[in-house]
């Protein structure tokens, strides 16, 4: 969910150069002082936001692969069956 929010903010920022995601986050989260400045610096432009979002998406993919391998083929097959049942209903 977090990567989608970050990607959404990057998308909005790309079309509105006057909207700064760092300031928006600092204001919405009621951050002050050095913490607010760190957030502003981290999310200062769309490129940084895109890099952070890509990192979180990569982490999600790696964790998904790890969990599938750890669960084994039988558990993965059962999850696929359950997903198909839910999609069909």
Image: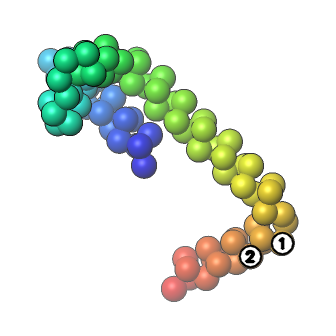
**Relative to 13, residue 62 above or below:** below
Image side of residue 83 versus residue 10, left or right: right
Q: Please give the name of the residue rendered at 61% of the width and 82% of the height, measured from the top-left corner.
A: 85
* Marker count (numbered): 2
Q: Which class describes the residues within 10 Å of circle 1: few (<14), some (14-19), or many (20+)?
A: few
Image side of residue 15 versus residue 83, left or right: left
**Relative to 82, residue 23 above or below:** above
User: In the rendering, at what x and y percent does residue 14 appear?
Assistant: 29, 23
Instruction: From the image, tell me which residue sits under label 2.
Output: 78
Which residue sits furthest front? 33
Instruction: From the image, tell me which residue sits under label 1.
Output: 74
Q: Nearer the viewer, residue 21 or 37?
A: 37
Which residue sits furthest bottom? 89
* Helix, strand or loop status at disc 1: helix
User: In the rendering, at what x and y percent does residue 2 appear?
Assistant: 41, 43
User: In the rendering, at what x and y percent does residue 61 appear?
Assistant: 64, 44
Dot 1 and dot 2 residues touching (CB under 8 Å):
yes
User: In the rendering, at what x and y percent does residue 56 appear?
Assistant: 52, 36
Q: Which class describes the residues within 10 Å of circle 2: few (<14), some (14-19), or many (20+)?
A: few
Q: Nearer the viewer, residue 80 or 21?
A: 21
* Helix, strand or loop status at disc 2: helix
């Amino acid at each position: 969910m977090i990567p989608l929010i970050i990607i959404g903010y990057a998308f909005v920022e790309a079309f509105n150069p006057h909207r700064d995601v760092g300031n928006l986050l600092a204001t919405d989260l009621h951050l002050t002082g050095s913490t607010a400045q760190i957030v502003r610096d981290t999310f200062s432009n769309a490129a940084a936001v895109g890099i952070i979002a890509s990192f979180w998406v990569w982490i999600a993919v790696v964790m998904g692969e790890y969990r599938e391998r750890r669960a084994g083929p039988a558990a993965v097959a059962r999850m696929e069956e359950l997903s198909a049942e839910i999609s069909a209903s």
